Amino acid sequence: MTLLPILVLAVGTFGFRIAGPLLSERLQLSARVQELMSMATIAMLAALVATSTLMAQGGFAGWARPAGVFVGALLAWRRLPFIAVVVAAAVTAAGLRLLGVP
Amino acid sequence: MGNVDRALVRDVGAVALASGVVGVSFGALAVAAGLSVWMALFMSVVVFAGGAQFVAVGMVAAGATPVAAVFAGLLLNARHLPFGMAVADVLGKRWPMRLLGAHLMVDESVAFALAQREPGRKRAAYWLCGGMLFVAWNMGVVVGGWAGRTVGNPELLGLDAAFPASMLALLLPSLLPPKEADASEVVKRKATKGRRVALVGALIALAATPLLPAGVPVLLSILAVGVALR
């Protein structure tokens, strides 16, 4: 990987990042549209959670990872501290892998 | 920053630590793929998007053309455009802050902002998370670049489960009705809508993942907003 592709990726990524704030200023989004944008964020974050829990390279990620996320989700739902959620998810997945679960 | 409390620093710290360790593995991968440590760090500072960095470096290492690698990375990062429309208020109106804030836009900082209710706390959470992640990620890349192949796989530490679990925990306040008995009808209705949108969005992305290039399924999930229109 050389300098030029890195720069193109950086400039393009920053373009995506700055376009949102600029567009929302230009378009003077109504409260209704702003609410829809936060719904769109919920949809995308939920999509990220689902795909990064279950999929790897376009196929199933194996059982250890979703099991870890499930334990974390259970703790989050029981309103345990955030740090407990993150640690429990990681420890569950790592523990299962130690036991040979893929 | 009166809106930063210890709980927020601790929560963001946990995510930053996990991100730093993933940064270590990126640094190791990049060096193994032929980048110098300093080039790997430069890439991490200017791109600052873990998923796209892994994809681009991995593709070039596997023999893809740089054009294809950059295209795949950009496709993965296109989600920042709608994210940016949602967090525009958080970035403020002043240009230097807006440019810097846009660069700190990552899944985690957007999710931390979404999880807060008051505007002041949204801003504090976004900037703290973006800033700490930027430092942790780039430090991790340098460490990984120096350590090279001796560093293990972050999957052995279960960190691949930590990312979705932390995002889910941050998403939950938007999906569950608040505990307080005095929560208004409006807030409850919003949570109900949020649950539907999240479920449909997740299903769309899962169905699309085997069929479409990485990045597109997450963009398609925006269609789930349709169920909130009624």
Image: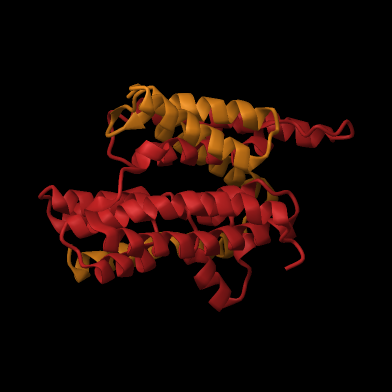
Chain colours: A orange, B red
Q: Is residue A97 left or right of residue B119?
A: left
Taking the spot 68% from the left edge, 39% from the top edge, the residue there is: A81
Q: Position of residue A89 (x, y in %)?
A: 51, 33
Residue, far right: B182
Q: Position of residue A51 (x, y in %)?
A: 41, 33
Q: Is residue B172 above or below residue A6?
A: above
Between A68 and B208, which is closer to the camera in this rendering?
A68
Taking the spot 32% from the left edge, 49% from the top edge, the residue there is: B75
Q: Position of residue A20 (x, y in %)?
A: 50, 59
Which image quadrant: the N terminus of chain B? bottom right
Which image quadrant: the C terminus of chain B? top right
Between A69 and B113, which is closer to the camera in this rendering?
A69
Q: Is residue B96 above or below residue A16?
A: below
Viewer can see residue B116: yes
Viewer can see residue B71: no
Taking the spot 54% from the left edge, 67% from the top edge, the residue there is: B101
Q: Is residue A80 left or right of residue B226?
A: right
Between B147 and B158, which is closer to the camera in this rendering?
B147
Q: Is residue A69 left or right of residue B93?
A: left
